[in-house]
Amino acid sequence: MTIAQKEWTKSSWHHYPALQQPNWPDPEEYRAALGTLCQLPPLVFAGEIRKLKKMLAKAAVGEAFLLQGGDCAEDFSHCTAPGIRESLKVILQMAIILTYAGGKPVIKVGRIAGQYAKPRSADTEMVNGIEIPSYRGDMVNSPEPTLAARRPDPQRMVKGYYLAAATMNILRAFTRGGYAALHRVHAWNNEFVKRSPMGQSYERLAKHISQAIDFMRVIGLDTDTPQINQADFYTSHEALLLGYEEAMTRQDSTAGGWYDCSAHMLWIGDRTRQVDGAHVEFFRGVLNPLGMKVGPSYDIDDIKRILDRLNPENEPGRMTLITRFGAKKIAQYLPPLLQAISRAGHQVVWSCDPMHGNTYTAASGHKTRNFDEIMEEIRCFFEIHWAEGTNPGGVHFELTGEDVTECTGGGRNILDHHLQENYLTNCDPRLNAEQSLELAFQIAELIRS
């Protein structure tokens, strides 16, 4: 038993204030749903979680790079094989660009197979003069703005589990069954991206990789290896619904210890990282690698206390700090945070979320983000780390493989008035595949520097 697990149980969080929890209208119905979840098989396994933690330990010292991305909030109706494949495809493309051009192993972590809950600034909102519960993600209620649709329904957690299991099944098939093999890098290019400058640059890189594999084969090197024919892909989500996370937490039968088997990696949001809050209490006892979002409102002493609580043994790979300041604020807020955490000796992976701090509302009323501001925050993130002598260890994006028009800018120069053409998100705007590839090429240059 680790220091963190002393006097901890998977239900000890009940004695602490829990923010961002839905107001479940029927307690018996809620308990019944959790009882069902407790009996269901794990979605991921302890051995996989330990493997990811070892890779993240390398990212903490600059020997690997974390690429984490996917939907802002997964939609139940989009849990289809083509939809999952397109999301996986763009992450595989970004990873191959970063690996080949950046020269480091890339840890591929999706916001997928469980990213069904979202924090909200208020429990309710006014729609046509009627106060209704806020939409908290498909695992809680429905986005339709009616009183009935917004009623929190605990059976949605059970449905979320089954859709996450179906997603995991497809992901394992794609990454282990040949689809993620390096000789198929051309097949990962989306049709709508192929015609773009980024798609053409990717095709040239894919051709170089294919030629390298052919050369290895010709001179007699074995290319029938997992490193070439498979891909390690991990899942993650913001762990908001503590009842669900508790129900998915199991004790490892081989090595001991408790693991939250809803995903390989979980993160605590900027709104739920209270030192004495229920989320920190729950996650101090599970052995998964953990992320924590850090926005401009942080208190340095609080961040250090949370790290001491979540990672008292200072285990490399356990903690990832995901900074989300915005292009205009990162130069003010990141340096003192880096300096304080470094002086305290905490071993963390530093990751940049350039999405949330750069959100604005266009004249059309659509919430959006600008590509140039996203890239500017990433560039500042790297430059500040170089100046401080710390390691820029990863990036964290909201993205999709679909041809959406949700973020402005990029190669096609999406403008505010283009947003309505294919704006599909129920929550926050996502990068499309072409924009994601463009970012990957630019980030690879920074890694190589």
Image (cartoon, rainbow, N blue to C red):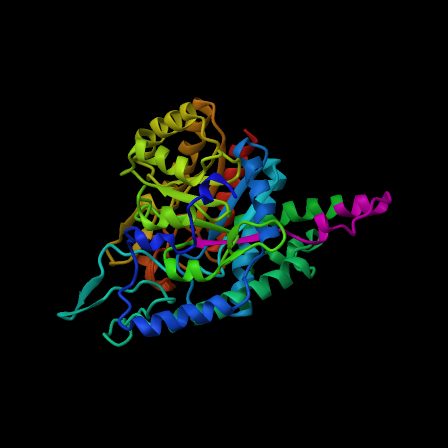
Range of residues picked out in magenta: 213-237
Q: Residue at x 28, y 34 (%)?
A: 299
Residue 98: image location, x then y, percent? 57, 41
| Residue closest to the far left | 129
Q: Residue at x 45, y 41 (%)?
A: 4
Q: Is residue 181 above or below residue 24?
A: above
Q: Is residue 446 above or below residue 422?
A: above
- Viewer can see residue 192: no
Q: Where, by quadrant of the figure, is residue 156 drawn?
A: bottom left
Left or right: 334 with respect to 175? left
Q: Residue at x 47, y 42 (%)?
A: 395
Residue 18: image location, x then y, percent? 30, 53
- Report how many numbered discs are placed on residues in the image: 0
- Residue sitting nearer the eye, 111 or 16: 16
Q: Residue at x 39, y 60 (%)?
A: 73
Residue 407: image location, x then y, percent? 37, 52
